[in-house]
Amino acid sequence: MMIVIASVAVAIVCFIVYTLERRSKEAPIEWIDAAKLSLFGGLITAGVVFATSTNVIADTMKNMDIPAVQDMFVGKPSW
């Protein structure tokens, strides 16, 4: 549910910012451009929220072999 709320909120904000920018220049609103900006803003937000809120990151971090990685950085450089 969080993905939908965040995506819709960002899409609305994108639309508002676009219309304010067009009004400040006294230019007509291009509805196709407004739709594209809102749609892609919402899609990108959905992807970011999905990637950062699922258990995929936690599961990936649990499976990493951290001591093996840390062994590379022990001691002084040989050069």
Image (cartoon, rainbow, N blue to C red):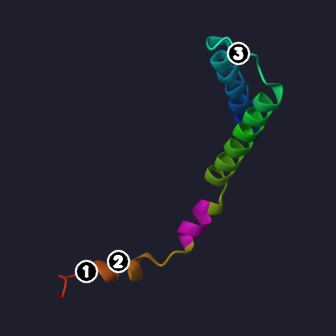
Q: Residue furthest bottom?
A: 78
Which numbered dot is residue 74?
1
Residue 2 makes an appearance in the image? no
- Which element type, helix, strand or loop, lies under badge 1? loop
**Amino acid type at image mark 2:** Gln
Residue at the location (58% across, 61% down)?
Answer: 58
| Segment colored magenta | 57-62
Which residue was labeled with disc 2?
Answer: 70
- Which element type, helix, strand or loop, lies under badge 3? loop
* Residue 8 image-quadrant placement: top right
- Separation of disc 2 and disc 3 at Cα? 57 Å
Is residue 61 in the magenta section?
Answer: yes
Pointers 2 and 1 in contact (C-beta within 8 Å): yes
- Residue 31 image offset from top left, x and y in percent: 82, 25
Left or right, residue 43 beside residue 66: right
Q: Quadrant of the C terminus?
A: bottom left
- Which element type, helix, strand or loop, lies under badge 2? helix
**Amino acid type at image mark 3:** Ala
Is residue 60 in the magenta section?
Answer: yes
Work out whether mark 2 precedes mark 3 in sequence or the reverse, and give the earlier one.
3
